[in-house]
């Protein structure tokens, strides 16, 4: 007896419950792998960029804390110095800040220009209040080199009381009719601490003079009395002046103040800042 069997009845092609064949399963697996590859190609760079930004933000905060702490300590030292010589030495203040932070720490940080990127020249001592206004400026490099050398400007501003021993409002028994004048003055002053009588003198690096401007926005030019040839490494400037000086004893930085009776200045007008 011969038995005839249909080979199609014993087909070995496997199927799944949904009816998909083996080639379809392989195709689905390849598609899933392709999707994972695309997600990885986008996700991993984004994750690395986010991690880099987090590291940069941490470094920025660290730099700000270091600069702020060093600036406050340098300002305290400068306040002691101005009690002896009423001139704010911004070069020394910057040097103290760099020394307190550590030059090696600054050079390997994201601070643009390293230690030379810190600027203090806008700091000054107010002759009216005796307060020291500290202004430290610097720039940090951002992690976006693809778009060029991008940086962000940061700064620390605060006020420190100077050691001048003067209490505003005290007359020390002086006549209430006493006023103050200077040589060749056209007005009289009722307040001895008027900013017109006392110059705000700063000692700044001469290489930064080109970018500096006075209170009115004007540039500084060499004093014809004390600057002969090139400026020194550090020069003296005032907030309202238009000259820089090589010598602190230059007459252009001096004010000879005379205390006189109001009746002696009847032909003069009162100062717009301190006289009623």
Image (cartoon, rainbow, N blue to C red):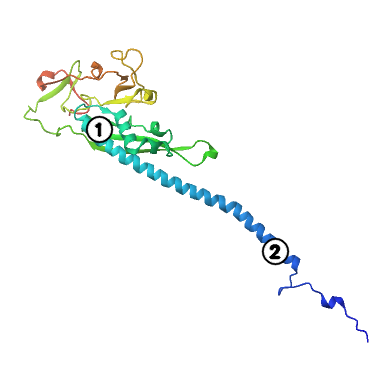
Of 258 and 55, the residue lying toward us: 55
* Earlier sequence position, callout 2 versus callout 1: 2
Q: Residue 21: image x %, image y %? A: 75, 69
Q: Which residue is found at the position 52% from the left and 50% from the top?
A: 48
Q: Say above or below: 56 vs 32.
A: above
Q: Residue 191: image x %, image y %? A: 16, 28
Identify the residue at the far right of this view. Answer: 1
Image quadrant in which you'd find residue 87: top left
Identify the residue at the far left of this view. Answer: 173
Which of the image's four quarters has the C terminus?
Answer: top left
The answer to whether residue 261 is left or right of residue 269 is: left
The answer to whether residue 7 is left or right of residue 98 is: right
Q: Which residue is found at the position 39% from the left and 26% from the top?
A: 211
Q: Do the residues labelled 2 and 1 touch (CB within 8 Å)?
A: no
Q: Residue 246 carries which label?
A: none
Picture mark count: 2
Residue 239 can be seen, yes or no: no
Q: Which residue is found at the position 63% from the left and 54% from the top?
A: 38
Q: Residue 78 carries which label?
A: 1
Q: Residue 251: image x %, image y %? A: 23, 16
Q: Residue 235: image x %, image y %? A: 31, 21
Q: How far apart in space, not on screen, are marks 2 and 1 (Cα)?
A: 74 Å
Q: Say above or below: 180 vs 165.
A: above
Which of the image's four quarters has the N terminus?
Answer: bottom right
Q: Mark 2 — residue?
A: 28
Image quadrant in which you'd find residue 185: top left
Q: SS of the residue at dot 2?
A: helix
């Amino acid at each position: 007896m011969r038995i005839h069997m249909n080979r199609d009845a014993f087909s070995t092609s496997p199927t799944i419950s949904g009816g998909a064949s083996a080639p379809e399963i392989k195709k689905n697996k390849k598609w899933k792998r392709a999707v994972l590859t695309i997600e990885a190609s986008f996700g991993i760079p984004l994750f690395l960029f986010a991690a880099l930004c987090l590291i940069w933000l941490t470094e920025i905060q660290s730099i700000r804390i270091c600069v702020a702490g060093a600036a406050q300590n340098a300002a305290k030292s400068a306040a002691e110095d101005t009690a002896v010589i009423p001139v704010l030495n911004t070069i020394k203040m910057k040097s103290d800040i760099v020394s307190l932070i550590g030059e090696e720490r600054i050079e390997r940080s994201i601070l643009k220009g390293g230690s030379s990127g810190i600027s203090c020249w806008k700091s000054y001592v107010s002759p009216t209040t005796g307060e020291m206004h500290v202004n430290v400026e610097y720039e940090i490099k951002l992690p976006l080199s693809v778009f060029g050398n991008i940086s962000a400007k940061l700064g620390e501003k605060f006020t420190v009381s100077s050691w001048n021993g003067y209490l505003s409002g005290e007359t020390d028994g002086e006549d209430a009719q006493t006023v103050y004048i200077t040589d060749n003055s056209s007005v009289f002053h009722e307040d001895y601490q008027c900013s017109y009588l006392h110059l705000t003198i700063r000692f700044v690096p001469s290489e930064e003079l080109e970018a500096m401007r006075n209170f009115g926005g004007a540039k500084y030019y060499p004093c014809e009395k004390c600057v002969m040839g090139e400026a020194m490494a550090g020069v003296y400037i005032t907030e309202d002046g238009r000259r820089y000086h090589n010598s602190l004893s230059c007459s252009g930085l001096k004010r000879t103040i005379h205390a006189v009776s109001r009746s002696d200045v009847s032909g003069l007008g009162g100062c717009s800042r301190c006289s009623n």
